[in-house]
Amino acid sequence: MTALSFTRLRERYLEDTRMGGSGSAPALARALEHIGWRAVRDPSPEELAGYLAMLVDACVHEHRDIMVLMDGMATVLRDTGPLLDGGLPPVEAYLPAAEELVLRYLRDDSTHESPPLSFL
């Protein structure tokens, strides 16, 4: 797993949530689209991004632990994603997608120029 920077995450989140900012949910929704979430259909990237924004907020303002954030995001992706064979894989199986989600959030410049990836 790539070493994600808490400092960079904090800076990005505070930039998004400053007075007049758009919040983190729009960029998180775009990050979800880039990892292929649009194919899931329900919940939509926009709906799920609101919940993920709460996880990022808790990371920035409470526990300050990237691994706790990754585990939380992986759990959400697993619990809200499609059941491929009627069972749920372990949360760890979703950690690469959670990491890519955060990396996409950190790199987001509000454009859709990059082709979506498919982790799901």
Image: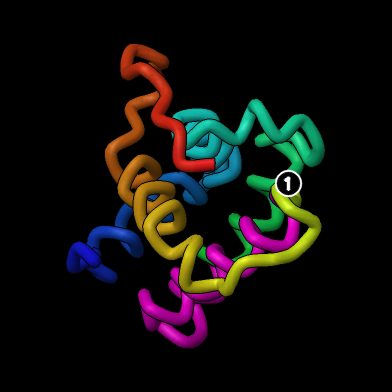
The residue to which callout 1 is attached is 82
Q: Amino acid at mark 1?
A: Pro
**For the view shown, which residue lies furthest in the front direction?**
85
Q: Tell me: 108 left or right of 40.
A: left
Write down the quadrant of residue 116 in the picture: top left
**For the view shown, which residue lies furthest in the left direction?**
3
Q: Nearer the viewer, residue 114 or 89?
A: 89
Q: Which residues are magenta?
A: 57-81
113 in magenta: no
Q: Tell me: 52 left or right of 43.
A: left
Q: Residues within 10 Å of mark 1 (few under 14, many from 20)?
A: some
Q: Nearer the viewer, residue 75 or 106?
A: 75
Write down the quadrant of residue 118 in the picture: top left
Most common secondary structure along the magenta stretch: helix
Q: Where is residue 74? Give x, y as percent.
A: 54, 65
Q: Where is residue 108? Give x, y as percent.
A: 35, 33
